[in-house]
């Protein structure tokens, strides 16, 4: 299926009037990274925006997620923040949009000395000439989206996708995307998390990408899953998904996906059983 990353303006124009500025802001962020050699080399996109733009998922989120295998350093933090601050504000005009984006702040979690470190940036956006635009200039935009950079994450399979005129983005390959979402489901009890979106995303990918059922692809999914679980110290076995806590946590608030999905949401028991069955068919032997 064609990737919307090749022509993001089509995705922007397909939105309802209220959603257009947000999608324009997402486009500005992606173009900033695609046009900046250092950011492009450092970051690999994953998550809900990747699902929507590269895999044509009907689920949309306002968070833009990236990973890098590089370890976190304060120098990398300062460099990334400086580049986003310098390049992002002018991209909207370059793209012909009335929206302007600015970095409104950033946080490092859980701390700069941690083994697993995330850099989260708050990106404000507003249409020029509006009261919100004046607040944006003051660093207090009422409209914002989040960018999350996860450091020290191995990425077994990736793709380079062309966007815009001469820009490129690194994105998670299909097998690594599936493995990451499976690992997130298994990790729920360990981290006291609730990952209802991953069941929907996995069900969608399994229904839409028939190649995932081929033996070679299943071997690659399992290989990537082992890497992802090893990186996060998640126990992995052929029956790991049968832990009742995995399904119970994933089902919590699953019905709230109706507000995030443009279309039907399969019943949880059907979606989870599809994922569980696929997990069991991986070549564990």
Image: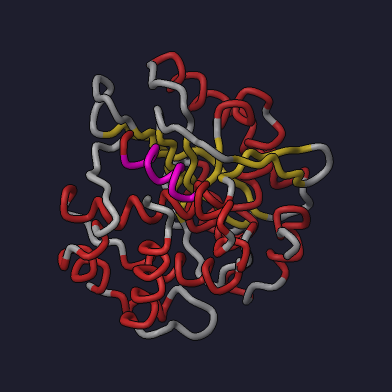
**Residue 144 visible, this orientation:** no
Left or right, 82 with respect to 194, comes to: right
Task: Write down the quadrant of residue 53 in the picture.
Answer: bottom right
Q: Position of residue 62 (x, y in %)?
A: 47, 58
Residue 239 lies in magenta, yes or no? Answer: no
In this rendering, is residue 38 above or below 5? above
- Snapshot colouring: secondary structure
Task: Point out the image quarter for the N terminus.
Answer: bottom right
Residue under the point 35% across and 34% down: 118
Q: Position of residue 207 (x, y in %)?
A: 55, 74
In the rendered image, residue 239, in percent from the top left (x then y), is placed at 25, 59
Residue 122 at x, y percent in the picture: 43, 43
Q: Is residue 101 visible?
A: yes
Q: Is residue 206 above or below residue 108?
A: below
Q: Which residues are magenta?
A: 221-229
Residue sitting nearer the eye, 69 or 93 = 69
Asked whether, in this view, residue 249 is left or right of residue 175, the answer is: left
Residue at the (42%, 78%) spot, across then down: 259
Quarter of the rendering containing residue 17: bottom right
Q: Residue at x 52, y 42 (%)?
A: 137
Rendered position, 31 above or below 279: above
- 207 vs 93, nearest the viewer: 207
Q: Total number of numbered labels?
A: 0
């Amino acid at each position: 299926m064609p990737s919307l990353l090749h022509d993001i303006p089509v995705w922007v124009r397909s939105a309802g009037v209220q959603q257009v500025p947000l999608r324009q802001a997402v486009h500005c962020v992606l173009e900033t990274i695609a046009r900046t050699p250092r950011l492009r080399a450092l970051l690999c996109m994953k998550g809900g925006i990747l699902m929507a733009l590269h895999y044509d998922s009907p689920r949309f989120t306002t968070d833009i997620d990236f990973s890098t295998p590089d370890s976190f350093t304060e120098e990398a933090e300062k460099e990334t923040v400086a580049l986003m601050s310098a390049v992002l504000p002018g991209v909207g005009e370059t793209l012909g949009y009335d929206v302007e984006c600015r970095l409104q702040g950033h946080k490092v979690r859980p701390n700069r000395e941690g083994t697993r470190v995330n850099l989260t940036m708050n990106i404000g956006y507003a249409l020029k000439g509006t009261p919100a635009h004046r607040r944006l200039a003051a660093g207090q935009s009422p409209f914002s989206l989040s960018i999350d950079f996860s450091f020290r994450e191995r990425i077994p399979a990736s793709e380079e996708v062309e966007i815009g005129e001469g820009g490129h983005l690194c994105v998670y390959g299909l097998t690594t995307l599936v493995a990451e979402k499976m690992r997130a489901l298994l990790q729920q009890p360990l981290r006291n998390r609730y990952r209802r979106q991953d069941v929907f995303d996995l069900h969608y990918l399994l229904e839409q990408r028939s190649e995932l059922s081929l033996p070679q692809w299943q071997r690659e999914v399992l290989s990537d899953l082992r890497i992802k679980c090893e990186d996060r110290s998640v126990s992995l076995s052929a029956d790991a998904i049968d832990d009742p806590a995995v399904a119970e946590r994933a089902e919590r608030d699953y019905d709230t996906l109706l507000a995030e999905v443009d279309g039907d949401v399969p019943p949880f028991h059907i979606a989870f059983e599809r994922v569980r069955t696929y997990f069991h068919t991986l070549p564990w032997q």
